[in-house]
Image (spheres, rainbow, N blue to C red):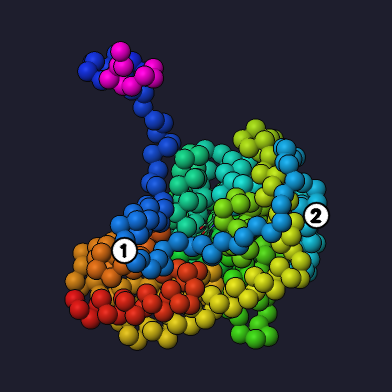
Amino acid sequence: MITPGGPFKTPPSRRLGEAPSIAPLAASQRSKIPAFEVMRITDEIARRRADGHDVVSLCAGEPSARPAPGTLKPAGYTGPLGTTPLREAIAGHYRAWYDVEVDPATVAVTTGSSGAFQLVFLAAFDPGDRVALASPGYPAYRNILTALGVQVIEIPTGPETRYQPSPELLAAAVREHGPLNGLILASPANPTGTMLDRPALTALVAWCVAHEVRIISDEIYHGITFPEPGAADPRGITLRELDPEAVVINSFSKYWGMTGWRLGWAILPQALVAPVEALASNFALSPPAPAQELAMRSFSAEAYGERDAVVAGFGRARALILDAEPQLQWGVAAPSDGAFYYYSELGPQLERFADSSGYARALLEGANVAVVPGTDFDSAAGHRAVRLSYAAGESAVAEALERIIRFQATL
Ligand SMILES: Cc1ncc(COP(=O)(O)O)c(C=O)c1O
């Protein structure tokens, strides 16, 4: 006879028609962090498309994927910090882009920059330590740190500091919360796309050095920048150049468009190399070997040229949004210096909606355009803002803008 649960054995508490005999065990307190809203919307977009809707998504921060060239060799584990040739190639990238010398032995290859955050936060901070970060900001910093028992100090930022921390804002945070152990920086940032120029970054580093604060610099959007011709530091400024105690984190996901290969890296100060190696060898054993082999092809003149052409396309999509600002009739927008994000308050459009989540929902249902409400990035003021990702490219952005303007006109 087939049992109600099918022919398979099920745990006693799951047997249909029987009182549970084993009480469910609770999840840990530290795992009580919010999920990433963008990924939930991504799921909803897939469902709507499966139902036959023609959805334009300005939602995910993901360039269109690049096909893998050639075939890969069979792959086993590599060293916990990655293969020596890839670590050397990454060091070479710092020479090529920034004219900065990096010791390949301080490069840790990781499973995306996300893997680097876990390892680096574990190696750099203890439970109860205080780590500051800008709000609005990338939610995973806050959520990973929280899960690790680190106290997150959110620094509310706005247009006066280009939505970035400043020494004055950090000093105010110390007065309110006590001394800091760390600061997360991102330039260009997600969701705002704003960048710190050299004087602003130098002032922040000086403050952090004076107050013994470790900087973790997320440089994942370096290279996705839109500088004026002849501008200094056109790719972004690496913290490796300014602060030997900083940890620099980067990834193959954004500039190189290799999100699904799950490969990133950290450049570590000497004292963190052995701790990160020990953690990596237990947490992940090794970063993915096929991805490492493929990533070796990322640093040729041809690959840089190909990716710079993709970035030029993002630049054209960005220009479409900036040109459409008067017709959008939104509120204050962050200066979109880099990455592929445009973060703006909705201003008068919000009069008809309770918040940006309501606006985003109505836009998806009424015009099949997906944008991300700012709530994920800023719990205090994000309900007034949305983020557009122009990684979708010029034609998707043009179509989305047309639909948004038409949608707003019919309200
Ligand atoms: C600012 C920032 N850092 C890190 C990541 C994580 O990227 P990955 O783990 O693919 O390297 C993202 C992804 O969107 C991001 O926006």
Q: Is mark 1 within 8 Å of ligand 1?
A: no
Visible residue check, residue 289: yes
In the image, which residues are magenta?
1-10
Please state which of residues 357 and 57 is positioned toward the viewer in this rendering.
57
Residue marked by disc 1: 53
As drawn, is 165 to the left or to the right of 9?
right
Placement of 255 over or under 72, stated as above or below: below
Q: Secondary structure at mark 2?
A: helix
Task: Quote the CA–CA distance across marks 2 and 1.
Answer: 47 Å
The picture places residue 337, in percent across and down from the top left corner, at 53, 75
Q: Nearer the viewer, residue 378 or 112?
A: 112
Asked whether residue 384 is in view, the answer is no
Identified at 56% across, 49% down, the residue is: 114
**Residue pictured at 59% horizontal, 74% vertical:** 311
Asked whether residue 8 is drawn in magenta, I would say yes
Q: Quadrant of residue 348?
A: bottom left
Q: For the C terminus, give its image quadrant.
A: bottom left
Residue 279 vertical position relative to residue 294 in the rendered view, above or below: above
Q: Name the one closer to the observer, 214 or 314.
A: 314
